[in-house]
Image: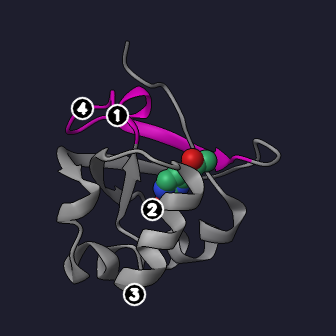
Amino acid sequence: MLLTKITFFERFEHDILSGSKTITLRDEAESHVIAGQILPVSTFETDRWFCDIQIIDVTPVKLTELTKVHAKQENMTLPQLRDVIAEIYPGLEQLFMIRFRILPQ
Ligand SMILES: CC(=O)Nc1cc[nH]c(=O)n1
């Protein structure tokens, strides 16, 4: 079943709106989006809409395969990215990298 919306933690909002966060790493349940799809984005905490994104592509990536390139696309260092993923998805190895672009508001 395709996702019809996506949420991000409020702490990522500024980076998304500024264009410095261009990927999101999700578990399998949240990986069901397709290239070209346009999704409304809201905050996880209060479900407040803050932008629309267009999906570029979705690629499986293992936790152990994460590199500085992924971290840069998340506007983080690699240790910060590993910590964030461990906090959000404890013990999860198989992730899905969703590349997106923010649509003009
Ligand atoms: C709400 C939520 O899960 N947000 C996430 C999860 C992983 N990456 C990300 O950028 N945002």
Nearer-N-terminus badge (4/3): 4
What residue type is disc 3 on? Thr
What residue type is disc 1 on? Ser
* Disc 4 crowd, CA 10 A, few/some/many (<14, 14-19, 20+): some
Name the spot of residue 21 as percent of width and height, x first.
Answer: 42, 72
Residue at the image position 24 percent from the left and 83 percent from the top: 68
- Residue behind mark 4: 34
Q: Is residue 92 magenta?
A: no
* Left or right relative to 64: residue 26: right
Name the spot of residue 33 as percent of width and height, x first.
Answer: 31, 31
Is label 4 or label 3 in front?
A: 3
Residue at the image position 41 percent from the left and 57 percent from the top: 103
* Left or right relative to 80: residue 22: left
Distance from disc 2 to disc 1, alpha carbons, whole Å, reads 24 Å
Name the spot of residue 4 as percent of width and height, x first.
Answer: 48, 25
What residue type is disc 4 on? Ile
Distance from disc 1 to disc 3, alpha carbons, whole Å, reads 23 Å
- Residue behind mark 1: 31
Instruction: Please report contact status of discs 2 and 3: CB closer than 8 Å, yes or no.
Output: no
- Residue behind mark 2: 104
Instruction: Please report contact status of discs 4 and 1: CB closer than 8 Å, yes or no.
Output: no
